[in-house]
Image: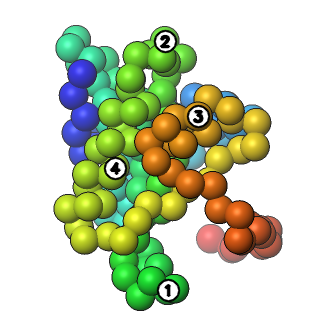
Amino acid sequence: MRVHPASAADLDDLTRLFAGYLQFYREDKPLAAIRLFLDARLSRGDSLLFLARDAQDRALGFVQLYPFQASLALQPAWLLSDLYVDECARRQGVGEALMNAARAYAESTGACGLQLQTAKSNLAGQALYERLGYVRDDLFHTYWLALPPGDD
């Protein structure tokens, strides 16, 4: 298996995988909207996507990172926003390889850490994160304010 930074050439595979990711979280979106979202991320460079492929070049999973500034640390950090492994490739080390690629990249950029959140019901993900040294935050609560869609 190899993990590499995704490019526009990977857009079809990323779109398929991202659709699976959204289905996992019970968010049904049209493939065209998913493709447009991912194409914007790749062309703008406002996030970084890593893609895992097997020896036959099949896309197995992805991780997406967004840069941010950790204000309390006064240092740059990365938000590990999305991690997904195709059902056919689970329990084969793909998620761990993607997480390790994210960590290596964050370390290479001088980041002070990686932050992520996951659904309370995602016990498999939580086990992986904790096994890799991630610590659940007991100091802060996460809040979300939904805003009305903007006019395009």
| Residues tagged 3 and 1 counted as in contact (Cβ below 8 A) | no
Give, as a three-letter code, the residue at label 1: Ser
Identity of the amino acid at label 4?
Answer: Ala
Looking at the image, is mark 4 or mark 1 earlier in the sequence?
1
Residue, x 46% and y 48% (percent of image)? 133
Residue at 62% across / 29% down in the picture?
124
Q: CA distance from mark 2 to mark 1?
A: 39 Å
> Which type of secondary structure does the marked residue at label 3 adopt?
helix
The residue pinned by badge 4 equals: 102
Marks 4 and 1, how far apart in space?
21 Å
Residue 114, visible in the rendered structure: yes
> Front-most of 29 and 76?
76
Residue under pointer 2: 88
**Picture coordinates of residue 90 (x, y %)?**
49, 18
41 w.r.t. 143: above or below: above
User: Is residue 35 visible to us here?
Assistant: no
Residue type pointed to by label 2? Cys
Report the disc number at residue 127: 3
Q: Amino acid at mark 3?
A: Ala
Specify the quadrant of the image occupied by residue 100.
top left
Q: Say whether disc 2 or disc 1 marks the residue closer to the N-terminus.
A: 1
Q: Secondary structure at mark 2?
A: helix
Q: Which residue is mark 1?
A: 71
Q: Earlier in the sequence, mark 3 or mark 1?
A: 1
Which callout, 2 or 3, points at the residue further toward the start of the chain?
A: 2
Neighbor class of circle 4 (other Cα within 10 Å; few <14, some 14-19, many 20+) is many
